[in-house]
Amino acid sequence: MTGHRVFAPDHLRRVATTIVEAGGSEPAESQVVADHLVLANLSGHDSHGVGMLPAYVRNLKAELLFPNRTPELATDHGSILVFDGCRGYGQAVGKMAMQQAIDRAKASGLVLMTLRNTHHLGRIGTYGEQAVAEGLVSMHFVNVADHNPYVAPFRGAEARFSTNPICLAMPSTDSQPQVILDMATSKIAAGKVRVAFNAGVEVPPGSLIDADGQPTNDPGVLHREGGSLLPFGEHKGYGLSIFAELLGGMLSGGGTIQPGNPRSGSIINCMLVLLFDPRRLVEHDWMSAELEAYVDYVKSAKATNADEPVLVPGDPERLAREARADGIAVDEESWDQILAAGEALGVERSALEG
């Protein structure tokens, strides 16, 4: 296991902003990307945090990611919006497309939005949080393409799709925080394998298979020919991943990961989002009371471990943000890769270390 360093969140924001801006982004875009990445770290999702910067720099230099893009509205049918992300930074393009969809949903009550051809969107829960902050319920189905697959189907020993995240988000009440389910349909996110590999630790059992289809805890297997992640919940996670591919990839017009579509070695996300105003369905005060009563009931269950009480979706992220508010740990290998990414864009290591 390698060592690690602990950084203040503001330090990591400055590092991310500096690197993204050195890659050609305007200050506003650099700030959006940096805030998104560091919030992922704060939320306990290091797989989608500042450790993604080296991949972004590689794609910038390969002209597979383009700074300062805005989402192009390809179709507007009132309650149906289709955007093209133009291979821009997903964190920035996604935020802009979501805001347009949110504004439309607040006016009309219901919007179906798709976003295609955008670089890595990052932590999908961020867009759920964006929706519930405006009082809306949201559902997100995302596929991941433009590279070789690395998740095997149920009963399969070869990869055929990616981590294909799903997010479901419910607004908060006066006493109950927002409920947000944000998950990969693989047992763990691919980025968590990268983090484990860099840190020199194993992944949880049931996460990976080797080229022969045999279980392994070695994160290095994903860097070697034939290793694959597994879907969570066997056929159940696999089935959800199929629909993330069809809803997010196919119905957005961006395409699935099938080999007839490009595989340039980048990270391209396509997303289908359903947004609606719950006040158009039920009386708001009743809904708030029902949500609070339901969550209270769920959490009243006796815990199997007294030190690990029952949680609801969104609680792990809130707890992580409290625990990491004063410092975020980054393993030495990941930190060195981030510094090297900055160097590749002309940023001195000393400018990022201080």
Image (cartoon, rainbow, N blue to C red):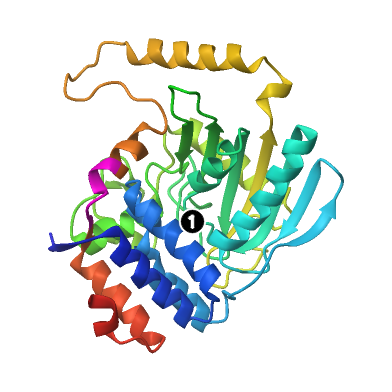
Which quadrant of the figure has residue 286? top right
Mark 1, Cα crowd under 10 Å, few <14 / some 14-19 / many 20+, is many
Q: Is residue 84 left or right of residue 342?
A: right
| Element carrying mark 1 | loop
Quarter holding the N terminus is bottom left
Q: Is residue 153 above or below residue 144?
A: above
Q: Is residue 207 left or right of residue 127?
A: left
Residue 345 x/y as whole percent: 41, 86
Which quadrant of the figure has residue 3? bottom left
- Name the residue nearer the viewer: 257 or 311: 311
Residue at left 35%, top 46%?
43
Residue 305 x/y as whole percent: 18, 20
- Which residue is label 1 attached to? 122
Q: Is residue 332 above or below residue 156?
A: below
Q: Is residue 252 left or right of residue 52?
A: right
Residue at left 22%, top 17%?
304
Q: Which residues are magenta?
A: 322-328
- Name the residue nearer the viewer: 27 or 73: 27
One can see residue 273 in this view: yes
Q: Is residue 182 left or right of residue 38?
A: right
Residue at left 55%, top 39%?
133
Q: Amino acid at mark 1?
A: Gly
